[in-house]
Image: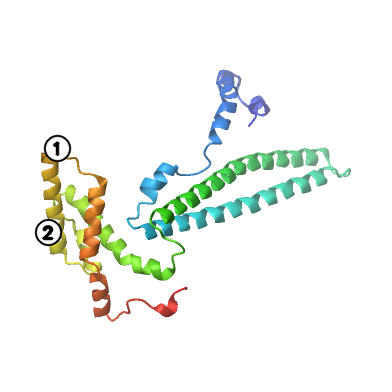
Amino acid sequence: MELAKIQEYIPEHYSTMLEVINKNLPHIEKTTKNFGKTYSQYQNCTVNLADLTPIRRLRSILAEIEKSYLALKEIKFKRDKQVLSIQIKQADSLNPDLHELSVRMLNLEIDEIRSQLETNELYLSGSIRRITAYIEQYNSISEKFNIKNFTEKDFEADEEKHHIMTAFSQALTAARARNGVIDEGNHIYFMTIGINGAIAQKRITDYLYSEQQNIDTCVTPSYEDIIKFLEQMATEFKGSSYKMIKDRGFLDISTTALLN
């Protein structure tokens, strides 16, 4: 953006500020090109893709790749239209019968579209880098957990484990803030997936007690300790959801509706 082009419209007492902007804007624009995306890779790996099972993380990454790819295609079509629009306006401006003011308007519109193109280039770059990062994270998880070409059936089979681990993770977090007591919302979650809230409370209480013992002996609890506990809960309560599902008259899963 060249502020010199609009300087004539700005009051004279803003001249000092304009000098600061003109001096620093090239560096600002160059640095801004490092971004063009909403989230950092760090935030994606910690906050945005926080699913507790590998298949769930892969599924979330696939959804993000699809969303980013659709955005990339939208930017591409928008860019193609803008380039074509510039060519049309340039051709129109060469019409000898066109009034001088109309030619100036066309040239102004061309400058505006070019400015929009510069902005689109930033988001185009951001989309490409975002998709690349997601693909590499997808491959990393696939390799670490040896998950190749998982199907919809595999995803459905993983869902109970995901929800049990998520329910206990949320309940554990809530209990820490409530003197060890699980909140009502997570009791509802346990009920929904076929787990008795009283036994869930007992498991949470036991874990917090053992954790406190470690702290008292100067052993710092780790993230791995929490994951181990959640994995144990997934193993202990495996099948609870499907017993409840059958009691309600549902099928475990409709195999006819699955993609193979």
What residue sits right under mark 2 in the picture? 202
- Nearest-to-viewer mark from 2 and 1: 1
**Residue 61 seen in this snapshot:** yes
Looking at the rendered structure, the kind of residue marked 1 is Cys
- Indicate the position of residue 87 as horizontal and vertical percent values: 77, 46
Query: Real-space Cα distance between discs 2 and 1?
Result: 25 Å
For label 1, the crowd category at 10 Å Cα-Cα, with few meaning under 14, some 14 to 19 and many 20 or more, is few
The residue closer to the viewer here, 62 or 238, is 238
For the residue labelled by badge 1, is the local secondary structure a helix, a strand or a loop? Answer: loop
Residue 248, located in which quarter of the rendered image? Answer: bottom left
- Indicate the position of residue 189 as horizontal and vertical percent values: 24, 63
Question: Which residue appears at 54% of the width and 31% of the height?
Answer: 31
What residue sits right under mark 1 in the picture? 218
Do residues under tags 2 and 1 come within 8 Å of each other at their CB atoms?
Answer: no
Question: Which residue appears at 53% of the width and 41% of the height?
Answer: 36
**Residue 170 seen in this snapshot:** no
User: In the displayed structure, would residue 166 be above or below residue 17?
Assistant: below
User: In the displayed structure, would residue 18 be above or below residue 206?
Assistant: above
User: In the displayed structure, would residue 73 be above or below residue 121?
Assistant: below
Question: Which residue appears at 50% of the width and 44% of the height?
Answer: 37
For the residue labelled by badge 2, is the local secondary structure a helix, a strand or a loop? Answer: helix
Residue 26, located in which quarter of the rendered image? Answer: top right
- Indicate the position of residue 234 as horizontal and vertical percent values: 25, 62
Looking at the rendered structure, the kind of residue marked 2 is Lys
Looking at the image, tell me whether mark 2 or mark 1 is earlier in sequence order: 2
